[in-house]
Amino acid sequence: MTFTFFAVLISIVCFFLVVIIMVQNPKGGGLSSTFGGSQQMIGSVQKTNQFLDRATWTMAGAIVVLTFLSSMTLKNNAASSYDELDGAAATEMTVPAVPAATEPSAPSAPAQDTPAE
């Protein structure tokens, strides 16, 4: 249950990270050029680039943290499942009764053929 929650969160954060990266343009375009790109705007190019840069690093950090947390819950779930299975196997499994071992009878001696004279 907990692992599923973290997997959904990781998927959502990855989606937003992809969107933020796709909005950026390494040559100064991207989201900032969509709004006119002039320096006199309220949300100037510099502030837009700073926001996108910080959002990228924040999302990347969130993925790292969520991945570590999900791996910790996965290990705990696997250990508890193993313990449950081990305990159930010990109580449910019984050793089958082994039939009493019988000694094999001694092989009869082969009949010896005597050559006819």
Image (cartoon, helix red, strand yellow):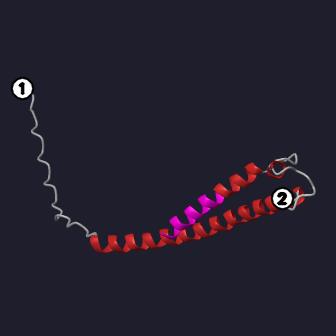
Foreground: 19 or 36?
Answer: 36
Quadrant in which the C terminus appears: top left
Viewer-nearest residue: 3 or 39: 39
The image shows residue 115, relative to residue 92, as above or below, that is above
Select label 1 or label 2 by which is in front.
Answer: 2
Badge 1 amino acid: Ala
Q: Is residue 29 above or below residue 41?
A: above
Q: Quadrant of residue 40?
A: bottom right
Task: Judge left or right: residue 113 versus residue 88.
Answer: left
Tell me if label 1 and label 2 are in contact, CB under 8 Å. no
Which residue is depicted at the point 82% across and 51% down? 35
**Is residue 8 a member of the stretch shown in magenta?**
yes
Residue under numbered circle 1: 116
Residue at image point 42% right, 73% down: 83
In-front residue for pair 37/66: 37
Give the mark nearer the N terminus: 1 vs 2. Answer: 2
Q: Is residue 113 above or below residue 18?
A: above
Q: Position of residue 20 (x, y in %)?
A: 73, 55
Quadrant in the rendering for residue 43: bottom right
Residue that lies at the very extreme toward the right in this rendered image: 39
Report the side of 100 relative to 43 (left or right).
Answer: left
Magenta residues? 1-14
Of residues 30 and 22, the one drawn nearer to the viewer in this rendering: 30
Residue 5 among magenta residues: yes
Q: Secondary structure at mark 2?
A: helix
Q: Residue at x 61, y 61 (%)?
A: 10
Q: Residues within 10 Å of mark 1 (few under 14, many from 20)?
A: few
Q: Which residue is mark 2?
A: 48
Cα separation between marks 1 and 2: 116 Å
Identify the main secondary structure in magenta. Answer: helix
Image spot of residue 108 (x, y percent): 11, 47
Q: Secondary structure at mark 1?
A: loop
